[in-house]
Image (tube, rainbow, N blue to C red):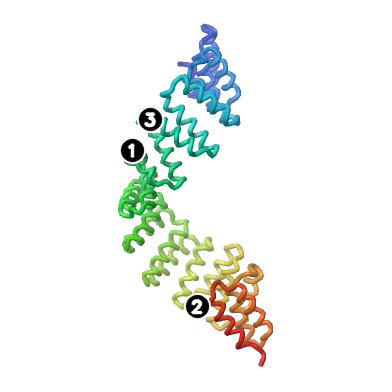
Amino acid sequence: MRAYCWSRLGKAQLAAATFEEALALDPQCAEVYAKRGVAAYYAGRKQDALRDLDRAIALEPDDANLLVNRALIARDAGGAAQPALDMITRALELEPSYSQAYEKRAEILEVEGRAAEALEDYGRAIEANPRNLSAREKRAELNHEREDYAATLPDYEACLARRPDDHWLRYQYGVALYKLGRQEDALREFEHARALKPDLALLHVECANLLHLVGRSGDAALAFREAIAAEPENVDHARSLAILYRKLDRLDEAIEVADDAVQRNPKDGAAWLLRARLRMHAERYPAAREDFERAMALLPPDAHVHYELATAFTFLEEYPRALQQLDRALELDPRHQQAYVLRGEYLARQGRLEEARSDLLRAIQLAPNVEETERLVERLNQLAPR
């Protein structure tokens, strides 16, 4: 219809005039009211759309498509779910094989938290039209959310048969396979997905994690590097690669990754913090101290980072500065058990035994396990008055 085409092209005045001409010729034409209503909806005039659809339904009360459109627009305009569900149910009574109506009713049910009913309706939509990939994909997603991964597989496979180059669908299929313990099959899908969408870092990261899990650490490192190339501003990818290198006892390479992260993201405190921690492992304490200080200048206050800096000062034998950092750590987090332990040792070294015992008692209260408790009790007994 010419008027509808004008409306979709943004020619509102031409569309309105053409709709009026059509209604002047046939004021009882439900199709014209329906088209004008849909055009009003796309133009953002939802109440006008509802009025025209009501006129169309009054003229054609048994038109299932009109009922479904009216229900969906009313719902989108903020209407309650149940009236929309009732109207779609009426449409399905008129046309029981209306696949899209089942699908749309399922979507509303899903939003309303009625997942079991939604799954039934997605199933009816597929039964009515086995080529309805939209309903299959939505059913797969809902089963995925419910962690019924086995139920997702037939729908993912049917969708991929028609859309083999859909990278996100392949990724989701791979996740379901992984959750079912089929690691090699999952890896195949992840590899395929990232080949289809090489600029999506998430796909490289997921593939890297799975490669490492199956013992292919070298390939995992390459996949993490591709994630960094795809999203260089995300320090998490560099952290993941650095941690992998550290697990492989390739600490120098881990530090090189952190160097690159700092160069790429000099204003990101996470990059400096990553390198600081790696330098601590490498016993490069002066450099680690500098990195901790740069990180703290860029990041929100964090008790554990202050504790880590105190540790660096300890190795550098700068004990007063270490004590300052521990005081600050405990101001930020009065339950930081490690900070109490370290501060207790410093206070004991200064001869402030009562304060040291107080810190060690607090550390014992916060100890994470029996072994740590026993170790601290023994240390506390050593500080007992003679």
Q: Which mark sits nearer the N-terminus, 2 or 1?
A: 1
* Depth order, front residue of 372/261: 372
Q: Which mark sits nearer the N-terminus, 1 or 3?
A: 3
Q: Is residue 197 left or right of residue 90?
A: left
* Depth order, front residue of 178/76: 178
Q: Position of residue 93 (x, y in %)?
A: 47, 21
Q: Secondary structure at mark 2?
A: helix
Q: Which numbered mark, 1 or 3, is in the foreground of this view? A: 3
Amino acid type at mark 1: Ala
* Depth order, front residue of 89/257: 89
Q: Position of residue 319 (x, y in %)?
A: 60, 82
Height in image: 40 above or below 270? above
Q: Position of residue 315 (x, y in %)?
A: 52, 81
Q: Secondary structure at mark 1?
A: helix
Height in image: 252 above or below 187? below
**In the image as oriented, which residue stretches furthest toward the right?**
354
- Residue beneath disc 2: 285
Q: Secondary structure at mark 3?
A: helix
- Residue beneath disc 3: 127
Q: Quadrant of the N terminus?
A: top left
- Residue beneath disc 1: 158
* Marker count (numbered): 3
Q: Which mark sits nearer the N-terminus, 3 or 2?
A: 3
Instruction: Tell me how far mark 1 sits from mark 3, CA to CA.
Output: 13 Å
For the point 36% across and 55% down, the residue is 207
Amino acid type at mark 2: Tyr
Q: Is residue 219 left or right of residue 290?
A: left
Q: Residues within 10 Å of mark 1 (few under 14, many from 20)?
A: some
